[in-house]
């Protein structure tokens, strides 16, 4: 009898061994494609390493000079502001329409006909290549494009509006394209979260006479917080990595006056000119900015949950 705990413990250890074995491929891929490039990038950021004509300068150790230069020239703040503005302009309508459509499709009482067809149509823009999408919008909103022609025929404008020559126009187009490309994916995620909510909660709310609006704000949204947190953090990371749409739409110039230039476009210019030291320093800054913003979003969400749980505990104690 005394040997039984040891036998049980050894059996658990044997099972755990297989778990570690199955983790080896993931760990190997993570080290090769994530950790090693990250460490290499940080290491290269401390060197002067660029092309001057056909002459290679460096690599020469210069310490924090690359970081100091990026901070002093002020471009980092400007491009970070551009990136966040375009992300917010695209994310706010994205989350609004995704919540609205998700609530409609997840509500079995509505019995929407051909719901599968509409879900497929909503998701289709996500399958289109961003470069192709950008070229389509570049053609549609060109000075001689169909959009300007329609607006002139309706008498709303007397001469073509140069969308890409105005900061609001170029930023708005980038945000609108990102909204169209990603709101279908967000809708599917939120709808899956809504369908996972226990129906007994909705039935109890109906019995108590709650309206659809009250059910949405008092039951659906609080239960969706983990999914909303995931969507917001992944969308924020994707927004900070925004590149292909503004790159193609503005030919890499961030027109007008670099008002639609993003952080990754700025990074790409250093990579294109083979200035690997500056590119490495900028990558580190981008990594830090992403981590800080993601941590802020996570902390706010956790704090909201704690604030809600405390009154419930106090009521239970009372």
Image (tube, rainbow, N blue to C red):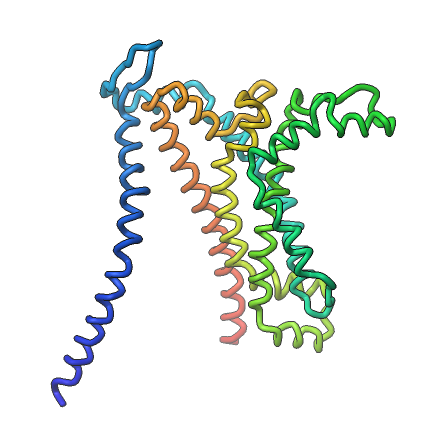
Which residue appears at 53% of the width and 66% of the height? Answer: 311
Whether 266 is drawn above or below 93: the answer is: above
Give the quadrant of residue 215: bottom right
Callout count: 0
Q: Residue 74 placed where, x, y %?
A: 46, 21
Which residue appears at 65% of the width and 72% of the height? Answer: 202
Whether 178 is drawn above or below 27: the answer is: above
Give the quadrant of residue 138: top right
Please give left or right for residue 267 compared with residue 185 in the image: left
Q: Residue 106 placed where, x, y %?
A: 65, 64
Q: Nearer the viewer, residue 114 or 179?
A: 114
Q: Residue 235 placed where, x, y %?
A: 52, 45
Q: Nearer the viewer, residue 29 or 8?
A: 29
Please give left or right for residue 17 compared with residue 225 in the image: left
Farthest-out residue, left: 2
Farthest-out residue, bottom: 1
Which residue appears at 52% of the width and 76% of the height? Answer: 318
Q: Residue 39 placed where, x, y %?
A: 27, 36
Q: Nearer the viewer, residue 123 or 6?
A: 123
Which residue appears at 47% of the width and 29% of the height? Answer: 263
Q: Quadrant of the N terminus?
A: bottom left
Whether 208 is drawn above or below 220: the answer is: below
Please give left or right for residue 270 compared with residue 199 in the image: left
């Amino acid at each position: 009898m005394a040997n039984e705990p040891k036998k049980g413990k050894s059996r658990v250890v044997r099972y755990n061994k297989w778990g570690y074995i199955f983790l080896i491929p993931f760990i190997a891929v993570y080290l090769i494609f994530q950790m090693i490039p990250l460490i290499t990038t940080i290491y290269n950021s401390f060197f002067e390493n660029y092309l001057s004509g056909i002459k290679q300068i460096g690599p020469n150790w210069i310490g924090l000079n690359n970081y100091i230069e990026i901070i002093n020239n002020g471009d980092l703040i400007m491009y970070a502001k551009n990136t966040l503005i375009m992300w917010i302009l695209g994310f706010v309508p994205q989350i609004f329409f995704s919540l609205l459509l998700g609530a409609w499709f997840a509500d079995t009482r509505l019995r929407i006909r051909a719901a599968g067809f509409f879900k497929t149509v909503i998701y289709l823009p996500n399958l289109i290549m961003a470069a192709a999408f950008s070229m389509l919008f570049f053609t549609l909103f060109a000075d001689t494009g169909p959009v300007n022609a329609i607006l002139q025929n309706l008498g709303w404008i007397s001469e073509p509006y140069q969308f890409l020559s105005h900061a609001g126009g170029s930023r708005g187009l980038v945000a609108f394209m990102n909204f169209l490309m990603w709101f279908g994916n967000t809708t599917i995620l939120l709808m899956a979260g809504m369908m996972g909510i226990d129906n007994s909660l909705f039935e109890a709310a109906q019995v108590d006479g709650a309206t659809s609006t009250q059910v949405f704000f008092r039951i659906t949204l609080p239960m969706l917080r983990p999914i909303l947190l995931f969507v917001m953090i992944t969308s924020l990371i994707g927004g900070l990595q925004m590149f292909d749409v503004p790159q193609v739409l503005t030919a890499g110039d961030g027109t007008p006056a670099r008002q639609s230039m993003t952080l990754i476009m700025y990074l790409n210019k250093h990579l294109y000119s083979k200035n690997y030291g500056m590119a490495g320093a900028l990558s580190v800054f981008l990594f830090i900015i992403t981590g800080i913003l993601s941590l802020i979003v996570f902390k706010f969400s956790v704090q909201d949950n704690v604030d809600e749980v405390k009154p419930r505990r106090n009521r239970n104690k009372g």
